[in-house]
Image: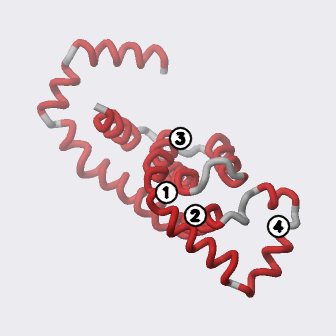
């Protein structure tokens, strides 16, 4: 049942009236939040950006849920990458010490190997994830959505009384 709800939310996001850019932007912002530890300065800034700019908040929440699961699996890789940046790259030591002496940066937890590694990996993934999601949304809308709407199960659900009641309620609250 839980899997069907997630799938339904994904289809709702893909069929939303937002542009592919708005959906893809929300998705990559949610990816950053999902891959990095939650209580960090950059995540609070990203949440603020989601509210300020016209991005699809549903795709951001979907990406947070999706990538949070991957983050637990990838934490050892994030730790290794962060350790390499913070400890092994001696050429960055002077810059990092100066950076960490700034009060707001000291509160940011960037001296944590997992935070540093996951943030850098998520920054590296921004462009590929954005362009993939933009392409996927366009492809879904042009090729898959019409076929899905023609499926017998979708027509049965849309023809039911429960769905009509849902549509009325949704129309009143929207």
**Mark closest to the chain's N terminus, 2 or 4:** 4
- Residue 16 falls left or right of residue 142: right
Query: Mark 3 Cα within 10 Å, few/some/many (few <14, many 20+)?
Result: many
Disc number placed over residue 57 in the picture, else none: 3
Looking at the image, tell me whether mark 4 or mark 1 is earlier in sequence order. 1
Q: Position of residue 33 (x, y in %)?
A: 57, 51
Dividing the picture into quarters, in which one does residue 9 lie?
A: top left
Instruction: Check disc 4 and report the residue beneath it.
Output: 100
The residue positioned 43% from the left and 49% from the top of the image is: 66
Q: Which of 103 and 157 is in front in this view?
A: 103
- Local SS, label 2: helix
Task: Give yes or no for contact between labels 1 and 2 (Cβ–Cβ under 8 Å).
Answer: yes
- The disc at residue 118 is 2
Left/right of residue 69 with respect to residue 121 in the rendered view: left
Question: In screen coordinates, is 20 left or right of 93?
Answer: left
Residue to which mark 1 is pinned = 71
C-alpha separation, residue under disc 1 versus residue under disc 3: 20 Å
Q: Do the residues labelled 1 and 3 touch (CB within 8 Å)?
A: no
């Amino acid at each position: 049942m839980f899997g069907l709800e997630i799938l339904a939310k994904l289809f709702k996001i893909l069929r939303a009236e937002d542009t592919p850019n708005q959906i893809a932007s929300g998705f990559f912002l949610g990816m950053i939040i999902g891959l990095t530890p939650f209580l960090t300065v950059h995540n609070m800034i990203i949440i603020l950006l989601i509210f300020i700019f016209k991005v699809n908040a549903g795709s951001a929440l979907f990406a947070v849920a999706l990538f949070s699961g991957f983050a637990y699996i990838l934490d050892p890789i994030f730790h290794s990458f962060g350790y390499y940046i913070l400890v092994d790259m001696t050429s960055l030591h002077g810059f990092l010490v100066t950076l960490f002496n700034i009060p707001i940066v000291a509160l940011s937890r960037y001296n944590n190997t997992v935070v540093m590694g996951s943030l850098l990996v998520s920054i590296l993934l921004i462009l590929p994830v954005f362009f993939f999601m933009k392409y996927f949304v366009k492809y879904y809308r042009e090729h898959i959505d019409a076929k899905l709407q023609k499926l017998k199960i979708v027509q049965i659900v849309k023809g039911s009384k429960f769905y009509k009641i849902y549509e009325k309620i949704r129309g009143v609250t929207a």
